[in-house]
Image: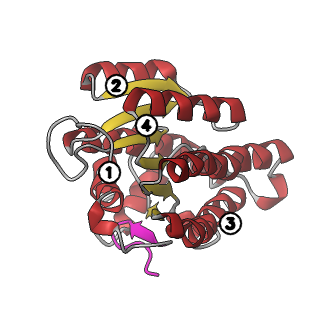
Amino acid sequence: MAGPGHGGGKLAGRSAIVTGGASGIGEAIVRRYVAEGARVAIADIDSRAAEDLSSELGDATFAFKLDVTEPASISAMVGAVAARFGGIDILVNNAAIFDMAPVLDVTRESFDRLFAVNVRGLFFTLQAVARHMVEQGRGGKIINMASQAGRRGEALVSAYCATKAAVISLTQSAGLDLIKHRINVNGIAPGVVDTPMWDQVDALFARFENRPLGEKKRLVGEAVPFGRMGRPDDHAGAATFLASADADFVVAQTLNVDGGNWMS
């Protein structure tokens, strides 16, 4: 167990990394983890946003500029966090990008970039942190952010859906392999979530489906059984549960947090 945490809570005394932690779902998880007593490294390619969030949240956090496509960046992050916090107990693999196009129009550049960040970057961040956790010898929790897009295909979103299906599969394989070290690997599959990224998604749907801006976002929100799009905060509870001792017997699962959009 790491040293004293920041206050009490389910994650008191734990140290965490949240990739893509400066905005959206990542930011919501960072805020909840700090409230639950964890010390958190806010790892994001947008270093200014990460620094601003860390300044707001105080000395329980620090910002690290992370590019998950660069092995040296991942290695430097692991070393920095371990030195700052005395170890790593939790990783939330949240950094991801989105793109879409009809199958006939997907470019190699877009395809490769999606897999570089969403799959390769996620896997080798997981690997680097897991190696450190094994060396520590005290187990840990790794949470991979998947998507309902990984549960099914979508005509305009083939490559992104494939990346998120890969995340679910890697979560299963890594979970089965690493539990012998008492490292629990699990995932969260959000549905449609009202973040700045979804405004970009809406603009792409407007282009490819010839819709007015805002219409696709409205329609997908209305289609959620809960009655609205998800919000970043809706995912912080699941991320806290999976990072806590309450989830010690949960292994290789991907939890749908989507207002009822998908059942599996």
Furthest-bottom residue in this view: 264
Of the numbered discs 4 and 1, the one sitting upstream in the chain is 4
Q: Which mark is residue 155?
A: 3
Magenta extent: 253-264
Q: Residues within 10 Å of mark 3 (few under 14, many from 20)?
A: few
Image coordinates for residue 44, horizontal then vertical, percent? 51, 31
Image coordinates for residue 197, horizontal then vertical, percent? 49, 41
Q: Which mark is residue 53?
A: 2
Q: Quadrant of residue 196?
A: top left
Question: Amino acid under label 2?
Answer: Leu
Q: What's the CA distance linking mark 3 and mark 1?
A: 25 Å
Q: Could you tell whether 82 is left or right of 57 in the image? A: right
Question: Amino acid under label 3?
Answer: Ala
Image coordinates for residue 7, horizontal then vertical, percent? 15, 37
Q: Residue at x 63, y 65 (%)?
A: 170
Q: Residue at x 63, y 38 (%)?
A: 68
Of the numbered discs 4 and 2, the one sitting upstream in the chain is 4
Of the numbered discs 3 and 1, the one sitting upstream in the chain is 3
Q: Residues within 10 Å of mark 1 (few under 14, many from 20)?
A: some
Secondary structure of residue under mark 4: loop
Residue beneath disc 4: 21
As drawn, 132 above or below 223: above
Q: Quadrant of residue 164?
A: bottom right
Q: What's the CA distance linking mark 3 and mark 4?
A: 30 Å
Q: Nearer the viewer, mark 4 or mark 1?
A: 4
Secondary structure of residue under mark 2: helix
Secondary structure of residue under mark 3: loop
